[in-house]
Image (cartoon, rainbow, N blue to C red):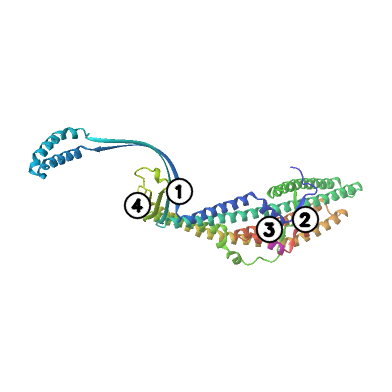
């Protein structure tokens, strides 16, 4: 990996935070997930409304009808015979003989007349019809199923929002780690460069002292070895800085090199009491997510209970082409259906028990989440306080290391101190600087962890502004 550019674009922490919010795919994905959950919850608000559907069918059909005429034919023949038998008596006596002769002839012809009527009559028709219909159905009572579905959808929105909040907190912690990690790399590069420059001067002075006969060659070699080690440390620090710069640029989706200009910081005064941060346990993403999971499980119990209750629906259908309808098709129908499941092939009792077990598991998970978050906050608060004290203790160590190096330089130049003492003094100063850089970085990361655990990572910039120790002030 190449070294950083000579003039990378500078960016403050707050500017980096704004850019992260605008460019992070993870944050955008979280926003989309929440929006999707909200839309699903909104969609369930209309479950109590009627469902209206329109359909159109082209139907080709053939219908064959068969009618049994044997009984009706016999009845008609008997009735005609009885009528003809009684008919002559209804006329005057002078005409009865004539009417009788006529009725006898007609009666003799009746079997032939009725015999021509078949025992059955068949009718067959074929047609094609167009049948457009409007159908509506509306739930009246669902045993609580609709309410359970709506409650579950609302709880799913809460879970999505909790996941979104947790993802946002993690992304900001990652930014803090990467942004101030780049500052650590810059500070270490500066520190190793200053150490190398010091050894350049020491080596030059040692060579001059050797040439003038004040020190032996062995002391020059000792300084040379230390100088080469400082050179390697500086090159290693430059590569680490290049890696940190690349990581920051990638995180912020920046096309070129980018330089963090907000320095590592420490607030010398202690943080507010840990109880201040514990007060926000219920608002943390982990707890909110577990509470939402409990809400989903509780809705599942209500849904399982609804399977034991009756359901009622209103329905209606209208035939929009009554002139071209099948003979058996009604013009319109309307009614109410009441349905109650007497026996199901899926064990409803075990289903309800399983839902209740999931509800209990979700309640236990929510309780454990509160314990875990409380422990995380307490541990993070202690880490911040430890890093703060370590950083402040290193102030006096740094001053002592500078003074020790000054004395050893004078003693070495006067030929009174060996080169090893000078090398040791430089090593002590370099180590102290590195420890201070590490302590400041540890403070910033621990603070970010504490704020993330208590869902207050948005306050990081406030604590940064309140800091009274900035690493750029200590060269």
Distance from label 3 to label 2 (Cα)?
A: 23 Å
In this picture, which residue range is highlighted in magenta? 461-465
Distance from label 3 to label 4 (Cα)?
A: 62 Å
Q: Mark 2–mark 4 contact, CB under 8 Å?
A: no
**Which of the labelled discs sits on residue 444, or is there none?**
3
**Which of the labelled discs sits on residue 429, or is there none?**
2
Sequence-wise, the earlier of marks 1 and 3 is 1
Mark 1 packing: few (<14 Cα in 10 Å), some, or many (20+)? few
Sequence-wise, the earlier of marks 2 and 4 is 4
Mark 3 packing: few (<14 Cα in 10 Å), some, or many (20+)? many
Closer mark to the observer between disc 3 and disc 2: 3
**Which of the labelled discs sits on residue 285, or is there none?**
none
Q: Can you tell which quarter of the image residue 442 is in?
A: bottom right
Mark 4 packing: few (<14 Cα in 10 Å), some, or many (20+)? few
Q: Can you tell which quarter of the image residue 285 is in?
A: bottom right
| SS state under label 2 | helix
Q: Can you tell which quarter of the image residue 396 is in?
A: bottom right
Residue 387, above or below 119: below
Q: Is residue 149 magenta?
A: no
Q: Mark 1–mark 3 contact, CB under 8 Å?
A: no
Q: Quadrant of the C terminus?
A: bottom right
Sequence-wise, the earlier of marks 3 and 2 is 2
The structure residue drawn at horizontal position 87% and vertical position 54%, both measured from the top left corner, is: 413
Is 331 on the left-hand or right-hand side of 292?
left
Closer mark to the observer between disc 2 and disc 4: 4
Distance from label 4 to label 1 (Cα)?
A: 26 Å
Closer mark to the observer between disc 1 and disc 2: 1
Name the residue nearer the viewer: 295 or 432.
Answer: 295
For label 4, the residue is: 341
Q: Residue furthest front?
A: 94
For label 1, the residue is: 53
Picture coordinates of residue 348 (x, y %)? 37, 52
């Amino acid at each position: 990996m190449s070294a950083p550019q000579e003039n990378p674009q500078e960016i403050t922490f707050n500017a980096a935070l704004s850019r992260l919010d605008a460019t992070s795919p993870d944050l955008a994905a979280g926003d989309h997930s929440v929006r999707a959950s909200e839309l699903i919850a909104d969609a369930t608000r209309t479950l109590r409304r009627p469902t209206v559907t329109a359909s159109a069918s082209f139907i080709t059909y053939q219908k064959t009808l068969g009618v049994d005429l044997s009984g009706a034919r016999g009845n008609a023949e008997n009735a005609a015979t009885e009528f003809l038998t009684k008919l002559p008596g209804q006329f005057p006596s002078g005409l009865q003989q004539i009417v009788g002769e006529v009725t006898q002839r007609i009666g003799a012809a009746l079997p032939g007349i009725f015999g021509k009527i078949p025992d059955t009559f068949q009718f067959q028709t074929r047609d094609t019809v167009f049948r457009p219909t409007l159908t509506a159905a509306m739930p009246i009572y669902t045993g609580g199923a609709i309410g359970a579905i709506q409650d579950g959808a609302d709880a799913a929105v809460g879970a999505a929002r909790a996941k979104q909040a947790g993802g946002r907190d993690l992304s900001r912690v990652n930014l803090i780690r990467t942004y101030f990690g780049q500052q650590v790399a810059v500070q270490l590069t500066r520190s190793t460069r200053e150490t190398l420059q010091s050894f350049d001067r020491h080596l030059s002075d040692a060579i001059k002292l050797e040439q003038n006969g004040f020190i032996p060659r062995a002391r020059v070699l000792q300084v040379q070895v230390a100088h080469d080690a400082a050179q390697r440390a500086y090159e290693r620090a430059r590569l680490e800085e290049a890696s940190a710069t690349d990581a920051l640029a990638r995180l912020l989706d920046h096309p070129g090199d980018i330089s963090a200009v907000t320095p590592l910081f420490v607030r010398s005064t202690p943080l507010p009491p840990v109880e201040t941060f514990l007060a926000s346990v219920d608002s943390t993403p982990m707890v909110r997510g577990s509470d939402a999971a409990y809400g989903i499980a509780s809705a599942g119990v209500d849904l399982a209970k609804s399977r034991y209750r009756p359901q009622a629906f209103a329905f209606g259908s209208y035939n929009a082409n009554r002139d071209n309808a099948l003979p058996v098709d009604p013009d319109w129908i309307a009614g109410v259906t009441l349905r109650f499941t007497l026996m199901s092939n899926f064990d409803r009792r075990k289903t309800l028990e399983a839902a209740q077990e999931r509800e209990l598991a979700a309640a236990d998970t929510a309780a454990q989440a509160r314990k875990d978050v409380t422990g995380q906050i307490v541990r993070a608060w202690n880490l911040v306080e430890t890093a703060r004290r370590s950083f402040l203790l290193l102030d006096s160590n740094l001053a002592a290391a500078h003074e020790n190096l000054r004395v050893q330089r004078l003693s070495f130049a006067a030929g009174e101190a060996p080169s090893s003492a000078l090398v040791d003094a430089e090593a002590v100063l370099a180590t102290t600087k590195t420890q201070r850089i590490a302590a400041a970085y540890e403070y910033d990361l621990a603070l970010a962890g504490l704020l993330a655990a208590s869902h207050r990572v948005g306050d990081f910039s406030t604590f940064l502004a309140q800091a009274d120790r900035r690493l750029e002030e200590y060269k």
